[in-house]
Amino acid sequence: MLIIDSKDCENIDKALKKYKKKFEKAKVLVQLRERQSFTKPSVKKRGQVLKAVYRQQVASGKFD
């Protein structure tokens, strides 16, 4: 649960902006999407390896 401390004189728009930032930093939507379906640990690891290979290729200059 996200709690936003707002002062009485603070504008509601500022409070809403703080809430949106806190919500995004908490990665609530990412967690919900991950929980919608189960992925096997081997599939997760394979994805991480493929991302690492791609990052290395980009860093070395093979991809533009």
Image: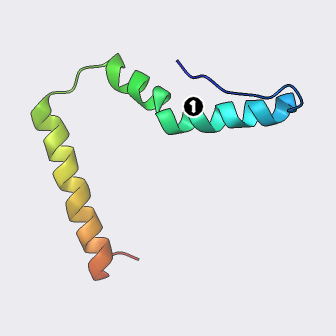
What type is the residue that disc 1 sits on?
Phe
The residue nearer to you, when weighing 8 against 22, is: 8
**Hey, which residue is sitting farthest bottom in the picture?**
61
The residue nearer to you, when weighing 31 against 20, is: 20
**Left or right of residue 54, residue 26 in this image:** right
Rendered residue at 24%/70% (across/down): 56
Q: At which x and y percent is residue 33?
A: 41, 25
Residue beneath disc 1: 23
Q: At which x and y percent is residue 62?
A: 29, 79
* Disc 1 element: helix
The residue nearer to you, when weighing 62 against 19, is: 19
Q: At which x and y percent is residue 10?
A: 85, 32
Rendered residue at 51%/39% (across/down): 25
Q: In the displayed structure, would residue 42 be above or below residue 61?
A: above
In which quadrant of the rendered view does residue 57 lie? Answer: bottom left
Q: In the displayed structure, would residue 47 be above or below residue 52?
A: above
**Left or right of residue 10, residue 4 in this image:** left
Image quarter of the C terminus = bottom left
**Hey, which residue is sitting farthest left in the picture?**
42
Rendered residue at 46%/33% (across/down): 27
Count the labels in the image: 1
The residue nearer to you, when weighing 63 against 47, is: 47
Rendered residue at 21%/49% (across/down): 48
* Protein image colouring: rainbow
For label 1, count other residues whose C-alpha is less than 10 Å away and answer few (under 14), some (14-19) or many (20+).
some
Q: At which x and y percent is residue 17?
A: 73, 36
In which quadrant of the rendered view does residue 63 lie? Answer: bottom left
